[in-house]
Image (spheres, helix red, strand yellow):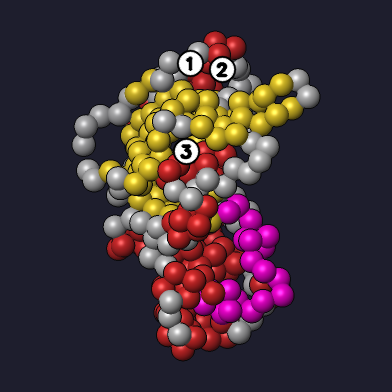
Amino acid sequence: MTTLLDVQNLSVSFPTRSGMFEAVRDISFSLGKERLGVVGESGSGKSITGRSILRLIRSPGVLKADRIDLEGTDLLSLSEKQMRDVRGHKISMIMQDPKFSLNPVMRIGEQICEAYRLHARASKAEAKIKAISMLEAVMIRDPERVFKSYPHEMSGGMAQRIMIAMMLIPDPQILIADEPTSALDVTVQKEVLEIMDDLVRERGMGLIFISHDLNVVSAFCDRVLIMYAGRIVETCQADQLHQAKHPYTQGLLNSLPQLEHPVDRLEVLKRDESWRLAPSVVNTETAG
């Protein structure tokens, strides 16, 4: 499998009154042309990991890594100007809530065209044609009307599709999706995941899918990283997630309600201090 991204010993910390807080601690992973899930409870470091790849950790936060390698280029060695060419063009990121990512005073078409023209150096006419085709690609009916609309006129599912279109229009090599379906109902969630899956497969991209929903990740992704307290505690094939070995992953799975096996009371997730201080990564991946 071709490696698009290689991250080695990534750490992110923030100053607090009681000292430096380590949000992400010495994690390493690689990404090929695949769908890589990153799961864990709130505060485990999932979103910080995604933002770190794009060097979006601002002062006073401190980002350190041996390397963040994008097809032979160490992103840590690039200037801020060079990183602006990477963001969006080579690596795009879909944030959690599209309502806060879209500019409320700009028409949707203007925002999508701006994202395309920034990297493609295209004319306004070319950008509009590309934007309309991208809206069609994410299954939006009447793309001409949506092109002229404002974000507040869109539903949550429509806004999320628009964000996907905006992030994919520059043809990036990698898409980072930070809980892109968390605010959507189950039916719309399924539609959005199918759209993302089709586009990623057609373009031969790498996808980092950040989520707290283990069932969605096990059904949608190829591989999974499980994070706890800023560390990766287990990696496995997505279809083997429910046979995970690490007690933290087992605890997450056991705390989920299951329609097939109803219980009177769900298990409370138990934590062990040793996982946070020096967890050993359990690797249950199999060659495939």
Label 1 packing within 10 angstroms: few (<14), some (14-19), many (20+): some
Vertical side of 287 occupied by 134: above or below: below
Task: Give amino acid for label 1.
Answer: Pro
Task: Give amino acid for label 2.
Answer: Arg
- Earlier along the polypeptide chain: callout 2 or callout 3? 3
Residue contact between numbered discs 1 and 2, judged by CB atoms under 8 Å: yes
Picture coordinates of residue 118 (x, y %)?
Answer: 49, 71
Vertical side of 199 occupied by 30: above or below: above
Q: To which residue does mark 3 refer?
A: 38
Residue in the foreground of this view, choosing between 85 and 29: 85
Mark drawn on residue 276:
2
Q: Is residue 112 magenta?
A: yes
Q: To which residue does mark 1 refer?
A: 279
Tell me the residue at 56%/17% (across/down): 276
Task: Give amino acid for label 3.
Answer: Val
- The magenta segment is 95-113
Count of numbered circles on the image = 3
